[in-house]
Image (cartoon, rainbow, N blue to C red):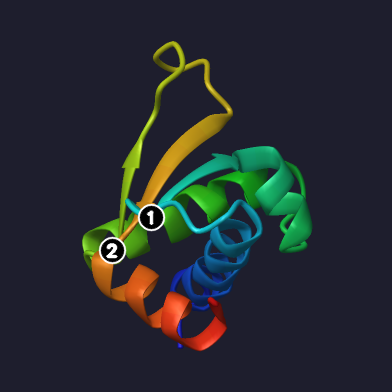
Amino acid sequence: MSADRSNAQRLEMLLVLQWLDEGMAVDGDVMLSVPTAAAELGLEGDDGLLALMAALGVLEDEGRVTVTWPGRPFDSAEARVLLSPEIARDAATLFGS
């Protein structure tokens, strides 16, 4: 398994946990702090930020998330991530009430 794919799987789990903690928004919406997520996954420094961005790209390419950047272009550490309906449904079934 490639490092990008491994990081993507770990990031997906982090996103699901954050979505559950934030009250399970119906649309699967999660606000992600890129530096915080990188630190939580043990991805340090500039290389860690790049690894996290690559993991987001993998998840987006696979259709598992949609990522938008609501801040100023090229100056935002916050991403708005929408979990795919399938991920939100599965997580709600497994962990929701």
* Image label count: 2
Q: Which residue is mark 1?
A: 28
Q: Which residue is mark 2?
A: 84
Residue 77 rendering spot, x and y as whole percentages: 58, 28
Query: Can you say whether 1 is above or below 88 in the image?
Result: below
Q: Are marks 1 and 2 in contact (CB under 8 Å)?
A: yes
Residue 56 rendering spot, x and y as whole percentages: 42, 54
Image quarter (top left, top right, bottom left or bottom right) of the C terminus: bottom right
Residue 3, labelled with which disc?
none
Left or right, 11 with respect to 48, comes to left
In this orientation, which residue lies closer to the viewer: 22 or 66? Answer: 22
Residue 95 rendering spot, x and y as whole percentages: 56, 81
In this orientation, which residue lies closer to the viewer: 75 or 97? Answer: 97
Q: Residue at x 50, y 87 (%)?
A: 94
Mark 2 residue crowding within 10 angstroms, few (<14) / some (14–19) / many (20+): some
Q: Amino acid at mark 1?
A: Gly
Mark 1 element type:
loop
Residue 39 rendering spot, x and y as whole percentages: 77, 52
